[in-house]
Amino acid sequence: MSIATASRSLSGHPRVDPDTRARVVAAAQALGYRPNIAAQALKRNRTTLVGLVLPGVTSNFYAEVSTRIQQVLGQDGYQVILCLHQEDPALEREHLLRLAGYQVAAIVHAPTGDRSARSVYAEAGLPVPYVVEINRHSLDGSTDAVCCADEDGVQRLAEDLIEHGHERIGMITAQPRESTARERLAGLQAALRNAGLPYDDTLVAVGEYSEKWGAEGLRRLVQRPDPASAVIIPANALVLGALRAVSELGLDIPADVSVVTFADFPWHSVHRPPLTSMQRPHEEMADEVCRLIAANVGRSPQLAAEPVLVRVPAQLTIRASVKTLTDDPIARRTAGQENR
């Protein structure tokens, strides 16, 4: 039969007789035939490759998100290339430019700061593939993004602490170069403001998203003359370090310090005590990224819609890591002000 008929049979073209398609497929299997991906990319002027440009996969969040994206996109015939920038802007740029050389169909990007992948490609004079940001979003608003509702999530954690009587609430966080750090801090500030409590920036330990800083930040907040009575830990990498510092200092949760997290590990429920946490919607965020890729890959730039920022809410799980200081902290504070 003709080359065209064999090609249509293998590509699933609808205008091929089922018996003919079965014979071609059987012959291809017997011969061990594999499609030439590079040749297909040249013909289509794009590949079925999707690049993931992420900080790393030691984070439970990025490990689960990347696994889910690969599973879902794989069902649609895409292959995933994983690139880890390790929070290094130079390495991030190198990965983005290399992916352009592969003519990837799309890129899933967790930016190191406020600079979008689009700006990197524009600066290099390269065409821009479809890009969707994950977890973090750049400031220029030129790129679709799927993020957790970070500000709302931390605000709800802080409100729970306030309801338990805590007024000196600390936070261990990173430099505000990423949207996540800024929005999580804004959540704490909003909760304090709504409760009529002052915001004390000395109770915010700012460093980097690392286990080492998690430990150092916890020590700073609890070893000061006027220690924080509760600490919000808003990132996976910080949790283990903070808990290690709690153990090394001989402290008890929640008797000595209350601890809540914005990252829910499976072991949080079996830790002693179990940790109150926001459960970030890993699977829902990954599925939304895949939906946007399916809707936008191959679309003409002239037909592209305005960039969207999708916020997926997290789920608050109350456990036993928060000590109750008073039943009504706001009433107690008001009474104290009247007495003065």
Image (spheres, grey):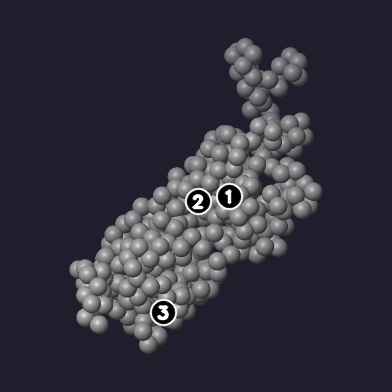
Distance between the alpha carbons at the discs numbered 2 and 3: 29 Å
Residue 36 appears in the figure: no
Secondary element at image label 1: strand
Quarter that holds the C terminus: bottom left
- The three-letter code of the residue at mark 1 reads Glu
From what the image shows, is residue 31 above or below residue 313? above
Residue 185 is situated, as x and y percent measured from the top left of the image, at 46, 65
- Considering only order in the chain, which callout, 1 or 3, is on the residue closer to the N terminus? 1
**Residue 78 horizontal side relative to residue 256, left or right:** right
State the residue position of label 1: 133
Residue 7 appears in the figure: yes
Residue 35 is situated, as x and y percent measured from the top left of the image, at 70, 32
Residue 227 is situated, as x and y percent measured from the top left of the image, at 36, 81
Q: Residue at x 55, y 51 (%)?
A: 134
Q: Residue at x 54, y 35 (%)?
A: 75
Q: Residue at x 32, y 76 (%)?
A: 229
Secondary element at image label 2: strand
- Considering only order in the chain, which callout, 3 or 2, is on the residue closer to the N terminus? 2
How dense is the environment of label 3, judged by Cα within 10 Å: few (below 14), some, or many (20 and up)? Answer: many
| Mark 2 and mark 3 residues within 8 Å of each other at the beta carbon | no
How dense is the environment of label 2, judged by Cα within 10 Å: few (below 14), some, or many (20 and up)? Answer: many
Residue 217 is situated, as x and y percent measured from the top left of the image, at 46, 77
Distance between the alpha carbons at the discs numbered 3 and 1: 33 Å
From what the image shows, is residue 28 above or below residue 276? above
From what the image shows, is residue 10 above or below residue 211? above
**Residue 23 horizontal side relative to residue 208, left or right:** right
State the residue position of label 2: 147
Query: Of 11 and 96, which appears nearest the observer?
Result: 96
**Farthest left residue in view:** 327
